[in-house]
Image: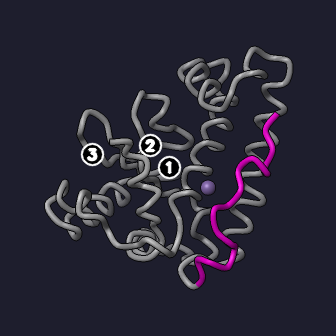
């Protein structure tokens, strides 16, 4: 059984204002993530997934048509915890290792924005780091890099619920705001495990 308390926000609801509203944080964490957790608990009860940890559920259900609902809800729980951990107001300057890898801070932002701009419908933008290489790409719906053996270090939720209260249809403004004001780069760098 998973519990919302196992996935606490790493900041206070008011910490991201004015870049992300209290209402958005509260709805996103307290309702959307909570619903994925509740659905996952119902779906895995009495199955071989019941005693697995979250990553095991994701890896084992990936590509299994029968377990698609389990995969979707488990991946969304992982993706959301990861996303909330990417947010903060204390460490928003792009680290040299990132700007160097992309040929500059603005080049990094342009690459991220261009990948985000190609997302049609619901999905996620990721930066991963594997074999000394940074990659930026999108996944559709609940899909997640850990189902493909990749190591996520940064993600942006591009489902409408992530931004609609604050930005309505202006999704690219949400992407800009995320890149300029909302990333906790300390969390990103801690994920490098170098
Ligand atoms: Mn979301």
Report if the beta carbon of the residue with label 1 is closer than 8 angstroms to ligand 1: no
Q: Position of residue 130 (x, y in %)?
A: 31, 36
**Which quadrant of the view contains residue 40?**
top right
Q: Quadrant of ligand 1?
A: bottom right
- Determine crowd level at label 2: few under 14, some 14-19, many 20+ residues with C-alpha closer than 10 A: some
Tell me the magenta residue range.
Answer: 1-17
Residue 139: which disc? 2
Numbered disc in front, either 3 or 1: 3
Q: Nearer the viewer, residue 125 or 133?
A: 133
Looking at marks 3 and 1 on the same chain, the residue that comes earlier in the sequence is marked by 1
Q: Is residue 45 magenta?
A: no
Which element type, helix, strand or loop, lies under badge 2? strand
Q: Nearer the viewer, residue 109 or 100?
A: 100
- Give the residue at mark 3: 134
**Which residue corresponds to the image point at 26% horizontal and 33% vertical from the top-left?**
131
Please name the predominant secondary structure of the magenta segment in the image: loop
Q: For the view shown, which residue lies furthest in the bottom direction?
A: 18
Looking at marks 3 and 2 on the same chain, the residue that comes earlier in the sequence is marked by 3
Q: Is residue 4 magenta?
A: yes
Q: Nearer the viewer, residue 152 or 163?
A: 152
> Relative to 24, is 43 above or below?
above
**Which residue corresponds to the image point at 69% horizontal and 30% vertical from the top-left?**
69
Gap in angstroms between the C-alphas marked 3 and 1:
20 Å
Gap in angstroms between the C-alphas marked 3 and 2:
16 Å
> Relative to 164, is 135 above or below?
above
Which element type, helix, strand or loop, lies under badge 1? strand
Numbered disc in front, either 3 or 2: 3
Q: Are marks 3 and 2 in contact (CB under 8 Å)?
A: no
**Which residue corresponds to the image point at 35% horizontal and 60% vertical from the top-left?**
117
Which element type, helix, strand or loop, lies under badge 3? strand
Left or right relative to 162: residue 150 = left
């Amino acid at each position: 059984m998973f519990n919302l308390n196992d996935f606490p926000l790493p900041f206070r609801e008011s910490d991201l204002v004015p870049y992300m509203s209290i209402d958005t944080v509260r709805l996103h964490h307290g309702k959307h993530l909570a619903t994925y957790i509740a659905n996952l608990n119902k779906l895995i009860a009495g199955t071989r997934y019941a005693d697995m940890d979250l990553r095991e559920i994701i890896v084992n259900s990936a590509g299994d048509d029968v377990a698609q609902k389990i995969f979707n809800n488990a991946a969304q729980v992982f993706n959301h915890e990861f996303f909330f951990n990417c947010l903060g107001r204390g460490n928003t300057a792009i680290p040299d290792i990132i700007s160097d890898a992309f040929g500059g801070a603005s080049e990094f932002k342009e690459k991220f924005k261009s990948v985000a701009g190609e997302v049609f419908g619901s999905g996620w933008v990721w930066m991963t780091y594997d074999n000394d290489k940074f990659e930026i790409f999108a996944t559709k719906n609940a899909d997640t890099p850990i189902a493909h053996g990749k190591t996520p270090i940064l993600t942006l939720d591009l489902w409408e619920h992530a931004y609609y209260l604050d930005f309505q249809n202006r999704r690219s403004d949400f992407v800009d705001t995320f890149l300029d004001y909302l990333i906790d780069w300390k969390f990103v760098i801690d994920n490098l495990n170098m």
